[in-house]
Amino acid sequence: MARRCVDAAPPTVHGLAVARLLAAYQFTVWGVPRGTAVFDSATLAVAELAANAVLHGRVPGRDFELVLVYDDGGGVLRVEVADTHPAHPVPSPAAAGAEPECGEEERGRGLLLVEAVADRWGVRERCGPGKTVWAEYVLKAVPGGFPGPFDPVEL
């Protein structure tokens, strides 16, 4: 059975914080234990994708959308962040090795982080203007395992 949580948030720092807190809460409700690799990785992905929507995908007057899907039958946790900006993001390999100059902010590493912690990720067109960036985590049951019932599956 697939469970779904959908929320819209303003493209602000407050909206970004709400998206991350909502995701952490919802993962816990679905039984994905805090402190596991899946919980931490999926929460990180929500934070990075929401930050990209706020920083790069912002269109005045338009919220970004957070969609969380947990398919316990298929063993997949999926996070999606959609915004109405038409530009598609790509990871910046140059940003991975580049050291920021004094006073410069570190930027351009969010999608590299998502790529590193997700089993799969991608970008797709959305109905209407903009795009959806998504990341998936494959889960497997661990009978009586600690710290919780879910650990990532090696691909």
Image (cartoon, rainbow, N blue to C red):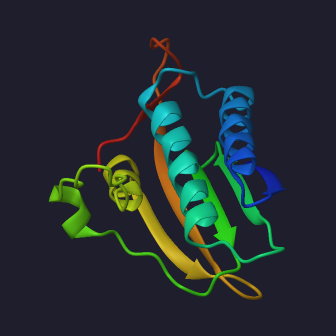
* Residue 35 image point, x, y percent: 49, 20
Count up the numbered dots: 0
* Residue 124 image point, x, y percent: 56, 80
* Residue 15 image point, x, y percent: 74, 50
Query: What's the residue at 18%, 53% (across, down)?
Result: 99
Question: Would you say 135 lies left or right of 105 here?
Answer: right
Quadrant hosting residue 104: bottom left
Question: Would you say 42 lies left or right of 96 here?
Answer: right
* Residue 55 image point, x, y percent: 57, 64
Query: What's the residue at 50%, 11% (across, down)?
Result: 144
- Of 136 and 72, which appears nearest the observer? 136
Query: What's the residue at 54%, 62% (across, down)?
Result: 52
Query: What's the residue at 56%, 21% (across, down)?
Result: 34
Residue 117, placed above or below residue 27: below
Question: Would you say 128 lies left or right of 134 here?
Answer: right
- Of 15 and 42, which appears nearest the observer? 15
